[in-house]
Image: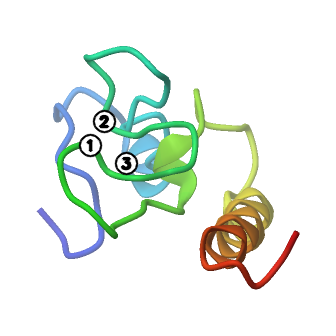
Amino acid sequence: MWPGFCSISSAITLKALHYCAGTCRMGSDADVVLDLRLHLNGIAALRVADASITQRANSSNTNAPSIMIGEKAADMIKQDQGLMQ
């Protein structure tokens, strides 16, 4: 394995390994990794804000979706801290 790559089956191509998406299930049931406000299940004050929360990998670079996810996470943190309505 190379640093920065997901540990997925070797049957998947290197290109698919480069864009890790859909690895953190999000929702409101008991089997999810993240809740709807990006909190990691079972660990207080920790959020996941990257391409792993998307349902599936897009066909292009994940930079723009990751930036959007980060901006939304920043807004959620500000709301939780009472800094934003």
Q: Amino acid at mark 1?
A: Asn
Residue located beneath label 2 in the image? 33
Q: Earlier in the sequence, mark 1 or mark 3?
A: 3
Q: Do residues under tags 1 and 2 come within 8 Å of each other at their CB atoms? A: yes
Q: Quadrant of residue 80?
A: bottom right
Distance CA(mark 1)–CA(mark 3): 25 Å
- Identity, as a three-letter code, of the amino acid under mark 3: Leu
Return the disc, 1 or 2, that comes first in the chain's sequence. Answer: 2
- Secondary structure at badge 3 equals helix
Which residue has dot 1 on it? 41
Image quadrant holding the N terminus, namely bottom left
Specify the amino acid type for callout 2.
Val
Give the residue drawn at x 18%, y 46%: 42
- Residue 37 in the figure: left or right of residue 14: right
Secondary structure under the numbered disc 2 in the rendered image? loop
Above or below residue 69? Residue 12 is above
Label of residue 75 in the image:
none
